[in-house]
Image (cartoon, grey):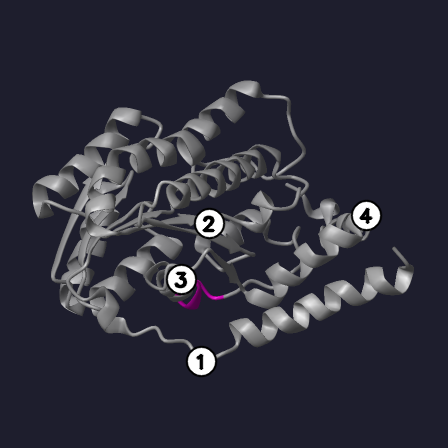
C-alpha cells in the first residue's frame, strides 16, 4: 500500500465518522423515565454524576460503592432531583458474592432490570510497573471479574426486558499507556470480554445491547489528584461525560468515545502508524514530576 493511501484512508475514515456521529441525536430524557438502573462506583466522580442525571430523568436507581456515608448523600440528592426511587448497597467489588448480591437486590426491589452500568474501579498506583503480581490479580478481580460476575447475574433479567449493559472503560483499554500497566491490563480485558459477548448475543438473537465507553482523561477528583503535573493533556468535564455515557446506553450504541476527537482520532493513528502514537503518548508525560 502506497504512503499516500496509508495517510489518506485514515483521514477519509475520520471525516466519515465525524459526519456520522455529528448528526442530530434522537436521545430524549424520557427514554430513562421509570427505567430500573444499577450504577456501580457511584459515590464519587462519573458514577455519582450518572446517578444524578438518571434521577433527573425519573429512573429507579440502585447505586453501589464502598463508602456508605457517601452513598447515603448520593441517594438523598437523587430523591431531591426526582428519581422514581433510589437505594444503595455498600461493599467491595473485590468480593464476587457482593457483586452478585447487588443484582439480586435489584431483582428484589423491582423484579426486573433495564440497564446495568458498570463503572467501579479499584485503587491502583500511577507509576512505573513495580512487578507486583498480587496487585494485578486484585485489580483484575475488581475491574474485570466483578463486571463479568454482575453481567452473568443480570443477563436473565436483561434478556426479558431487552435491556442494556454499559461498560465504562478507557483509552487505556485500547492503547498501552505508561505508568498504568495494571489498570490498562484490566481495561483491555473488558474490551475483549464484552466485545466477544456482544457477538454471541447477536448470534443467539438476544436483544441485549452492550455499550463500551472509551474515555479519555476526565476531571474527577481522584484522577486529577493522581496525574497532576505528570500527565499534561487537558481533562474533560465529568458531568458531560456522565451524560454521554447514559445517552450511549439508551441509544444502544456499540461504543461511546468521550471526548470524541481526543479518543477516536488517536485510535486511527494507532491502526496506521502505531509508533507515532506511542511517541505522542510518551510526550504527554512529565515523568520528572512523578511523586
Q: CA distance from mark 4 to mark 3?
A: 31 Å
Q: Label 2, on which residue?
A: 222
Q: CA distance from mark 4 to mark 1?
A: 35 Å
Disc on res. 275: 4
Place of residue 140 in the rendered image (x, y in percent of width and height, measured from the top left) = 47, 29
Question: At numbered mark 1, what does the secondary structure look like: helix, strand or loop?
Answer: loop
Instruction: Please indicate whether residue 81 sits to the left or right of residue 270 in the image.
Output: left
Q: Main secondary structure of the magenta part?
A: helix
Pick the front one: 31 or 143: 31
Residue at position x 64%, y 25% in the image: 130
The first of marks 1 and 3 along the sequence is 1
The first of marks 2 and 3 along the sequence is 2
The first of marks 4 and 3 along the sequence is 3
Q: CA distance from mark 2 to mark 1?
A: 33 Å
Would you say residue 234 sits in the magenta stretch? no
**Circles 4, 1 touching at the beta carbon (< 8 Å):** no
Q: Label 3, on which residue?
A: 248
Q: Label 1, on which residue?
A: 24
Residue at position x 46%, y 49% in the image: 222
Residue 147 occupies quadrant: top left
Would you say residue 240 sits in the magenta stretch? yes
Q: Which residues are magenta?
A: 237-241
Instruction: Please indicate whether residue 30 sits to the left or right of residue 273 in the image.
Output: left
Q: Is residue 69 above or below residue 257?
A: above
How crowded pointer 4 is (Cα within 10 Å; few <14, some 14-19, many 20+) is rated as few
Q: CA distance from mark 2 to mark 3?
A: 24 Å
Place of residue 39 in the rendered image (x, y in percent of width and height, measured from the top left) = 28, 49
Place of residue 136 in the rendered image (x, y in percent of width and height, measured from the top left) = 53, 26
Can you tell which of label 2 and label 1 is closer to the viewer?
1
Q: CA distance from mark 1 to mark 3?
A: 14 Å
Question: At numbered mark 3, what does the secondary structure look like: helix, strand or loop?
Answer: helix
Amino acid at each position: 500500500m502506497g504512503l499516500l493511501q496509508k495517510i489518506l484512508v485514515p483521514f477519509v475514515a475520520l471525516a466519515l465518522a465525524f459526519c456520522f456521529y455529528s448528526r442530530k441525536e434522537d436521545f430524549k430524557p424520557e427514554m430513562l423515565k421509570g427505567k430500573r438502573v444499577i450504577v456501580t462506583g457511584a459515590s464519587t466522580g462519573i458514577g455519582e454524576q450518572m446517578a444524578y442525571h438518571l434521577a433527573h430523568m425519573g429512573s429507579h436507581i440502585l447505586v453501589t460503592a464502598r463508602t456508605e456515608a457517601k452513598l447515603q448523600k448520593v441517594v438523598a440528592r437523587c430523591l431531591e432531583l426526582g428519581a422514581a426511587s433510589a437505594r444503595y448497597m455498600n461493599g467491595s467489588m473485590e468480593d464476587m458474592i457482593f457483586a452478585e448480591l447487588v443484582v439480586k437486590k435489584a431483582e428484589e426491589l423491582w423484579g426486573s432490570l433495564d440497564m446495568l452500568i458498570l463503572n467501579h474501579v479499584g485503587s491502583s498506583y500511577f507509576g512505573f510497573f513495580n512487578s507486583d503480581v498480587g496487585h494485578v490479580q486484585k485489580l483484575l478481580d475488581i475491574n474485570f471479574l466483578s463486571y463479568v460476575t454482575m453481567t452473568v447475574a443480570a443477563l436473565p433479567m436483561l434478556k426479558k426486558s431487552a435491556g442494556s449493559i454499559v461498560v465504562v472503560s478507557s483509552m487505556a483499554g485500547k492503547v498501552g499507556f505508561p505508568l498504568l500497566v495494571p489498570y490498562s491490563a484490566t481495561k483491555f480485558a473488558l474490551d475483549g470480554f464484552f466485545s466477544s459477548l456482544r457477538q454471541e448475543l447477536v448470534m443467539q438473537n438476544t436483544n441485549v445491547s452492550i455499550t463500551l465507553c472509551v474515555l479519555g482523561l476526565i476531571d474527577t477528583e481522584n484522577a486529577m489528584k493522581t496525574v497532576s503535573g505528570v500527565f499534561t493533556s487537558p481533562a474533560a468535564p465529568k458531568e458531560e461525560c456522565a451524560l454521554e455515557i447514559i445517552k450511549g446506553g439508551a441509544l444502544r450504541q456499540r461504543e461511546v468515545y468521550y471526548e470524541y476527537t481526543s479518543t477516536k482520532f488517536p485510535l486511527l493513528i494507532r491502526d496506521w502508524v502505531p509508533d507515532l502514537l506511542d511517541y505522542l503518548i510518551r510526550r504527554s508525560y512529565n515523568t520528572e514530576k512523578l511523586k
